[in-house]
């Protein structure tokens, strides 16, 4: 038999709040077909105790892997099929919105007074707020545009009314 470069142990909590372990040292665990562990046991009072028992039986250091494997082995021992692991779904990458000036985002002419900036911000914020059916990314853009224009140091000179 070939020996694994890393021997592994999977530990899971049972319904009775005890720890069940399953260890593989002659080959890696596989899902389909499910590869039986080289040894397993339950009833340990802690995960550390379970690992120590598994290492004592294996006669070598074991690396702890995800608890899926121990849970799957308990199901196989009951005559049930090993559960499929949940595969994380890829997240959709949001499309980047084109860069616009803060004035264009708030739909204002360049150099508008602060009162007009505030009024435009409130109008655009209501229209783009996610709680009112708007797009969260667009709402954040409106907020950043308002922050840039409402801060006197970053805004360009405004006309006085």
Image: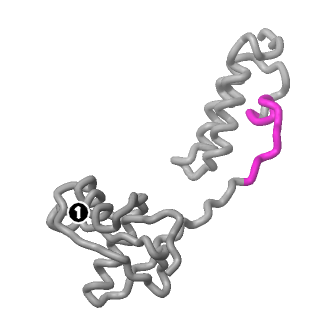
Q: Secondary structure at mark 1?
A: strand
User: Image quarter for residue 77?
Assistant: bottom left
Disc 1 crowd rating (10 Å Cα; few below 14, some 14-19, many 20+) is many
Q: Quadrant of residue 63?
A: bottom left
Q: Position of residue 153 (x, y in %)?
A: 74, 11
Residue for point 64% across, 35% down? 123
From the image, give the main secondary structure of the stretch colored magenta: loop
Question: Does the magenta run of residues contain 72?
Answer: no
| Residue 71 position in % (x across, y down) | 32, 72
121 up-or-down from 127: above or below: above
The residue shown at (37%, 77%) is: 37
Q: Quadrant of the C terminus?
A: top right
Does residue 111 sit above or below 49 in this rendering?
above
- Direction from residue 37 to residue 85 in the image, left or right: right
In the rendered image of this protein, does residue 58 appear above or below residue 132? below
Give the residue pinned by disc 1. 19
Q: Position of residue 39 (x, y in %)?
A: 31, 75
Q: Which residues are magenta?
A: 95-106
Q: Residue furthest bottom?
A: 79
Q: Left or right: 77 with respect to 35?
A: left
Foreground residue among 153 and 80: 80
Q: Is residue 101 magenta?
A: yes
Q: Position of residue 129 (x, y in %)?
A: 58, 43
Position of residue 8 relative to residue 26, above or below, is above
- Who's the residue at 82% across and 39% down the image? 99
- Considering every residue shown, the one lying at the far left of the view is 16
The residue under the point 34% across, 67% down is 58
Left or right of 101 on screen, residue 140: left
Tell which of 142 and 57 is nearer to you. Answer: 57
**Numbered label tally:** 1
């Amino acid at each position: 038999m070939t020996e694994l470069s890393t021997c592994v142990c999977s530990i899971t909590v049972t319904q009775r709040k005890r720890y069940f372990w399953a260890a593989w040292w002659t080959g890696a665990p596989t899902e389909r077909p499910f590869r039986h562990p080289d040894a397993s046991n339950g009833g340990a009072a802690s995960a550390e105790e379970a690992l120590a028992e598994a290492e004592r039986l294996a006669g070598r250091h074991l690396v702890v892997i995800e608890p899926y494997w121990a849970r799957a082995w308990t199901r196989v021992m009951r005559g049930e099929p090993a559960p499929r692991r949940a595969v994380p779904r890829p997240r959709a990458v949001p499309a980047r919105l084109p860069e616009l000036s803060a004035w264009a985002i708030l739909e204002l002419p360049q150099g508008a007074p602060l009162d007009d900036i505030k009024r435009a911000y409130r109008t655009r914020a209501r229209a783009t707020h996610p709680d009112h059916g708007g797009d969260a990314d667009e709402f954040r853009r409106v907020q950043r545009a308002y922050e840039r224009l409402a801060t006197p140091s970053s805004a360009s000179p405004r006309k006085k009314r």
